[in-house]
Image: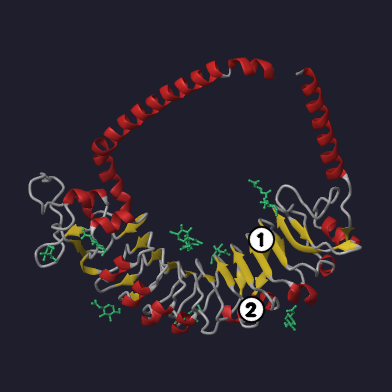
Amino acid sequence: MKLSTTTTTILLLLLLYTTTTTTLSPPSTTLDPKQLRALQSLYIPTTHDPCTQPPHNATTCDSATPFRHLLSLRLTNCSDDLSLSTTALSSLSTLTSLTFLDCHTPIVHFPTSLTTNLRSFTSINSLQHLTGVFLSRFSNLTDLTISGDTIKSSGIRIITSNMKSLTTLTLSNTNLTSFIPKHWNPKLTHMDFSNNKLNGTIPTSLTLLETLKFLNLSSNQLTGEIPTSFGDLISLQNLSLSSNSLSGSIPGSISTIPRLTHLDLSSNQFNGTIPRSISEIKSLKYLNLAHNSFHGVMPFNASFITKLDVFKISGNDNLCYNHSTISKTVSKKLKLGIAACDKHGLPILPPPAAEEPESSVDDMSSGDYDDDDDGGNVKKKNGDHDNGPNKVVLGVAIGLSAVVFLIIFLVILSKCGGRCCCCC
Ligand SMILES: *[C@@H]1O[C@H](CO)[C@@H](O)[C@H](O)[C@H]1NC(C)=O
Ligand SMILES: *[C@@H]1O[C@H](CO)[C@@H](O)[C@H](O)[C@H]1NC(C)=O
Ligand SMILES: *[C@@H]1O[C@H](CO)[C@@H](O)[C@H](O)[C@H]1NC(C)=O
Ligand SMILES: *[C@@H]1O[C@H](CO)[C@@H](O)[C@H](O)[C@H]1NC(C)=O
Ligand SMILES: *[C@@H]1O[C@H](CO)[C@@H](O)[C@H](O)[C@H]1NC(C)=O
Ligand SMILES: *[C@@H]1O[C@H](CO)[C@@H](O)[C@H](O)[C@H]1NC(C)=O
Ligand SMILES: *[C@@H]1O[C@H](CO)[C@@H](O)[C@H](O)[C@H]1NC(C)=O
Ligand SMILES: *[C@@H]1O[C@H](CO)[C@@H](O)[C@H](O)[C@H]1NC(C)=O
Ligand SMILES: *[C@@H]1O[C@H](CO)[C@@H](O)[C@H](O)[C@H]1NC(C)=O
Ligand SMILES: *[C@@H]1O[C@H](CO)[C@@H](O)[C@H](O)[C@H]1NC(C)=O
């Protein structure tokens, strides 16, 4: 026994020795000295291997000889006295990906060698004085993300018209004005223009983007209707058009999008009846139609609604639910926030809060008629009934599992007691 312990110790020491020597040995090739100086001017520590920046992978390099070159660089939480220089940027023209994250610094001239080589460019809460013309020079990008930085530009078209390979585009929270361009790379997969000041309509040509998976146009000033050909966006998974001034009815073709999981049309002026066919979208997990002007009978049943992770419908004053298919208690539980229908399919106005006996099915509690926020009250009231038993069950479950665990532990202890002593 003693012998084997000694051997193990020696083996372990050997292993430790070899691993430390390999990690401490210099990399087979070193970074291009010009690029090393550029990194130093950007306050990137270069004492260890500058191609593996712990702990956040700020850099990646190729494996060229005699010198390696930078392929990607991410600057995060830069110090206030960081200033980019065109010289430093010129020596970084091997980069294909450049990211600024919480790195507040004014832009300088980016040399053409860098702008045409980059495939991915990101600035989140970082670069100051961005302009459309500055960004338009990154002509070979596949991936452009600007968020939280003002872009001075007369429109998105100025920025993207040269970017023929663009597949992912985020220009969010940038105070962009003007309209959504008509012409796009047909391979575009991701488009996010949320939180800007875009106006005009959603161009019908957008529905030609057969590979588009993600479209977020929320919080702009868009007007007009959803193009009827919207169902042509056959790859779409996440769609938000929330908080605009869009109107008209939901085109039925939207229900034919096979993998749609997230549909947010809230806070617009959509009207008409809600297409029942939406409940045929098998992949749907999130459905928000709140704060619009839909009317008629809400077409979904309780089993469809409970299958969703999120369902919001409140804030549609002329919309109601059929209380013979969704009972009052179920409607409370689902926090629909709309009234029940009368026999003509019109919402029953809520009775004054004072007279709220639980007598007739037609009675509406004030909670049912309220907004999401007030839905909290209903939840609280119900909470006594709904959560009470749950808490008891949870307590019992925890207690039982603790006992079971203790028993297992004792059995294991008694069985391997002898061996454990050997180990020590
Ligand atoms: C760093 O890179 C390694 C290997 O590429 C990866 O496994 C790890 O998740 C990355 N870490 C961070 C913080 O990005
Ligand atoms: C940046 O700074 C914030 C706050 O000081 C910190 O929470 C965050 O982890 C930092 N990020 C990086 C990548 O250093
Ligand atoms: C990058 O774009 C320019 C045009 O702006 C083009 O001439 C060049 O061939 C492209 N480079 C690569 C590597 O794709
Ligand atoms: C957008 O403009 C408003 C005022 O017009 C300003 O308060 C806000 O900070 C700007 N947002 C960004 C991201 O530049
Ligand atoms: C759209 O953008 C808004 C604001 O940036 C965000 O809150 C929302 O979650 C996004 N929606 C989707 C579907 O990603
Ligand atoms: C859109 O906004 C721009 C700039 O704010 C304005 O000049 C234009 O008239 C607006 N167009 C529409 C259709 O509202
Ligand atoms: C819905 O809105 C559109 C555009 O605002 C309007 O033309 C139409 O009459 C409205 N339809 C209904 C049923 O209210
Ligand atoms: C898309 O929507 C789903 C469902 O709401 C959500 O879990 C997922 O994070 C969204 N994806 C993106 C990229 O926002
Ligand atoms: C509820 O609606 C779904 C989708 O329309 C349908 O498949 C299902 O049969 C309905 N369930 C009941 C109980 O009516
Ligand atoms: C409510 O549903 C019942 C049973 O499906 C049906 O007979 C009745 O017409 C519906 N009421 C309204 C207003 O749609």
Circle 1: element type: loop
Q: Is residue 302 above or below residue 194?
A: above
Q: Is residue 155 visible?
A: no
Q: Position of residue 50 (x, y in %)?
A: 82, 53
Query: Residue at point 25% right, 48% down?
Result: 333
Q: Which residue is mark 2?
A: 165
Q: Is residue 102 above or below residue 227?
A: above
Q: Amino acid at mark 1?
A: Ser
Q: Are marks 1 and 2 in contact (CB under 8 Å)?
A: no
Circle 2: element type: loop
Discs 1/2, front: 2
Which corner quadrant holds the C terminus? top right
**The image quarter in which residue 29 lies:** bottom right
In-front residue for pair 288/301: 301
Q: Is residue 2 visible?
A: yes
Q: Which residue is mark 1?
A: 126
| Beta carbon of the mark 2 residue lies under 8 A of ligand 3 | yes
In-front residue for pair 117/261: 261
Query: Residue at point 32% right, 63% down?
Result: 291
**The image quarter in which residue 354 lies:** top left
Query: Residue at point 43% right, 68% down?
Result: 239
**For this view, does 200 lie left or right of residue 255?**
right
Q: Position of residue 334 (x, y in %)?
A: 27, 52
**For this view, does 289 lie left or right of residue 141?**
left
Looking at the image, is mark 1 or mark 2 earlier in the sequence?
1
Q: Amino acid at mark 2?
A: Ser
Q: Position of residue 197 (x, y in %)?
A: 49, 72
Which corner quadrant holds the N terminus? top right
In-front residue for pair 77/56: 56
